[in-house]
Amino acid sequence: MNWTLAPEPYDSPAATALRRAYYYDVASSYWKRPATEAEIDEGLKDDGVEQLAAPTGEFFVGRYDGEPAACAGILRFAPDTAEITRVFIRPEYRGKGGSGLLMSTLEDAARALGTQRIVLDTRLDLIEARTVYVRHGYQEIPPYKTVLKYSEIWYAKDL
């Protein structure tokens, strides 16, 4: 059993399915009930994902034994800073070693964009995600952008 991770267009079938699964997962957790298809459609509408393509960023799809299992994006946020976004591993693939590959790939992509720092924001209740970030050297920082409804904690790492 092994992981592969590669850039992929954000609108490919696998990337689209993973983005929908990501939104379902985080929205359902937030609302404490399953998100509907209409809510997922609304949440993904005009979400800025098109920035996760050259020259401003990149979108990655992780596969576990060939099956689409994870995704994440990197976005040039400022001249020296990149932002990690849409980090997701399908629940059935968590605990199988994919987070390390995901984080190192995102950091390499940030370096390739010419940045020296990575930032991200998340929610307090997403404990698994927060654990991954801290385990990979990210430290809590003050908000680095306008606080959005779902932003509750911010992290950064110098590369």
Image (cartoon, rainbow, N blue to C red):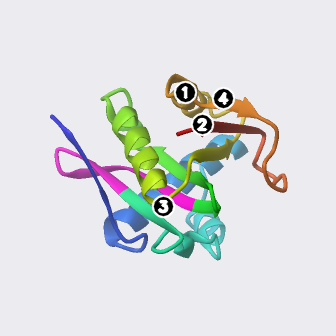
Q: Residues within 10 Å of mark 4 (few under 14, many from 20)?
A: some
Which is nearer the eye, 81 or 91? 81
Q: Which residue is labeled 3 in the image?
A: 113
Residue drawn at the location 55% of the way across and 47% of the way down:
25
Q: Quick check: marks 2 and 4 in contact, CB under 8 Å?
A: yes
Residue drawn at the location 84% of the way across and 52% of the way down:
147
Looking at the picture, which amino acid does disc 1 mark? Answer: Gly
The percent coordinates of residue 105 (x first, y second) are 37, 46
Looking at the picture, which amino acid does disc 2 mark? Answer: Lys
Label 1 residue SS:
loop
Q: CA distance from mark 2 to mark 4?
A: 6 Å
Which mark lies nearer to you, 1 or 3?
Answer: 3
The percent coordinates of residue 82 (x first, y second) are 59, 54
Marks 2 and 1, the one that precedes in the sequence: 1
What's drawn in magenta, residue-wise?
61-75
Magenta span main SS = strand
Q: Is residue 13 visible?
A: yes
Q: Quick check: marks 1 and 4 in contact, CB under 8 Å?
A: yes
Q: Which residue is labeled 2 in the image?
A: 157
Looking at the picture, which amino acid does disc 4 mark? Answer: Gln
Residue drawn at the location 49% of the way across and 57% of the way down:
73
The percent coordinates of residue 61 (x first, y second) are 34, 56
Marks 1 and 3, the one that precedes in the sequence: 3
Which is nearer the eye, 145 or 98? 145
Residue drawn at the location 67% of the way across and 37% of the way down:
155
Q: Which residue is labeled 4 in the image?
A: 139
Q: CA distance from mark 1 to mark 4?
A: 6 Å
Q: Which residue is labeled 1 in the image?
A: 137
Which mark lies nearer to you, 4 or 3?
Answer: 3
Q: Residues within 10 Å of mark 1 (few under 14, many from 20)?
A: few
